[in-house]
Amino acid sequence: MGYAMVVNEAGGAGLFKKQDTKMGRPRKGQLVVKHTAIGLNFIDVYQRSGLYPAPGGYPAILGCEAAGEVIGIGAGTQGFRLGDRVAYTIPGGNYCSDRIIAADRVVKIPKGVSDAVAAGAMLKGLTAHYLIHDCYKPKKGDTVLVHAAAGGVGLIVGQWLAALGITSIGTAGGTAKCKLAKEAGYTHVIDYKKDDFVAKIQRLTKKQGVAAVYDSVGKDTYPGSLEVLSDFGTFVSFGQSSGPATDFKLADLSAHGSLFAIRPTLFHYIATSKELTRRSRQLFKMIGEGKIKIQINQTYPLKDVAKAHRDLEGRKTTGQTILIP
């Protein structure tokens, strides 16, 4: 008998309840995966709180990335064996001890990459990949800004930009988080609790601004993000940890220099098995070569997911957080 952590309605972290689950049989094209590690992400908080709809509605099992062992294979399913270590990211359904999942949504974990690292890398690492390869691909000579530089995505983006030789500016809150961001490879780090990031960036860039801003914070940062962009710069909004930018207007783009703006989501970029596999291989290659280190700074038992959510919302976490069934 397995179990899942379930929320029956949108609201606070205290709504999580442990619920026994019974596994059915996998069909053709499906696998049974026994989870060994589950990644925690801000999108989980959005879905729990009701800011974003929970996939499939309520009651809901949340969670968007996990790793584990293949313990069952549907008849006729090709490409996997019992015991394979696999990882995946899909919208919801992962806060559980085991589950059935479509085989074309799963990638094998290469040797040298632990289950915990894979679980903490899938959503955040693939997000970092599409941000800097598709939304705005920095070129030599560019300077770019990344908000929440000490967060899960931010630390990976910083390392990837450093490997590409891109000048980067990261913002983070507090000395400890700024230190983490600097260690991740950011050229400059701004403590937004002490400094006005707009004024600081204008000084750093000699009022030239940045080519792109990768902004997962939203309400608190987006006005300044637009202000620091150079003419024809790109505003990439991929999250809203401080709340949505409800007063954003298209006219804001022309007012700040004929800017471009994009509001992407990962699952459009990995909609096909081919794209999922291609991007995952590039990510695991960077990890395997040591160019990207997945920093797992917090672990919690899955049954304590409510505390993990509270700590994430309270900005008490850095890097990746892993839940252990």
Image (cartoon, grey):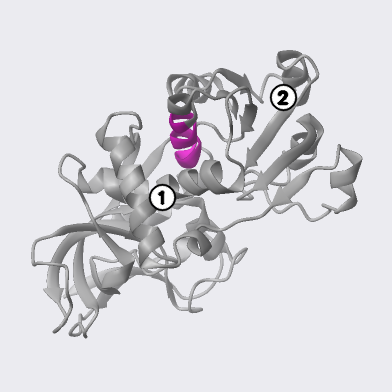
For the image shown, how many numbered marks are present on the structure?
Answer: 2
Camera-nearest residue between 195 and 111: 111
- Res. 161 mark: none
Crowding near the residue tagged with mark 2, few <14, some 14–19, many ≥20 C-alpha atoms within 10 Å: many
- Asked if disc 2 and disc 1 are in contact, CB closer than 8 Å, the reply is no
Residue projecting furthest to the front = 140
Against 28, residue 66 (above or below) is: above
> Given the image, on which type of amino acid does mark 1 rest?
Lys
Q: Quadrant of the C terminus?
A: bottom left
User: Foreground: 105 or 154?
Assistant: 105
Dot label at residue 197: 2
- The reply to whether the magenta stretch includes residue 277 is no
Report the amino acid beneath label 2: Phe
Q: Earlier in the sequence, mark 2 or mark 1?
A: 2
- The answer to whether residue 64 of the structure is visible from this angle is no
Specify the quadrant of the image occupied by residue 255: top right
Give residue 124's position: percent from left, percent from top: 44, 47
Q: Residue at x 37, y 69 (%)?
A: 93
Q: Is residue 131 left or right of residue 38?
A: right
Query: In the image, 165: left or right of 322?
Result: right
Q: Position of residue 10 (x, y in %)?
A: 55, 70
What is the magenta segment's predominant secondary structure?
helix
Residue bearing mark 1: 307
From the image, which quarter does the N terminus lie in?
Answer: bottom left
Which residue is pictured at 41% across the width and 50% down the height?
307
13 on left or right of 5: right
- The residue at 53%/19% (across/down) is 175
Asked if one can make out residue 235 in the rendered structure from this viewpoint, the answer is yes
Q: Which residues are magenta?
A: 151-160
Q: Quadrant of residue 22?
A: bottom left
Residue 84 percent location from the top left of the image? 13, 60
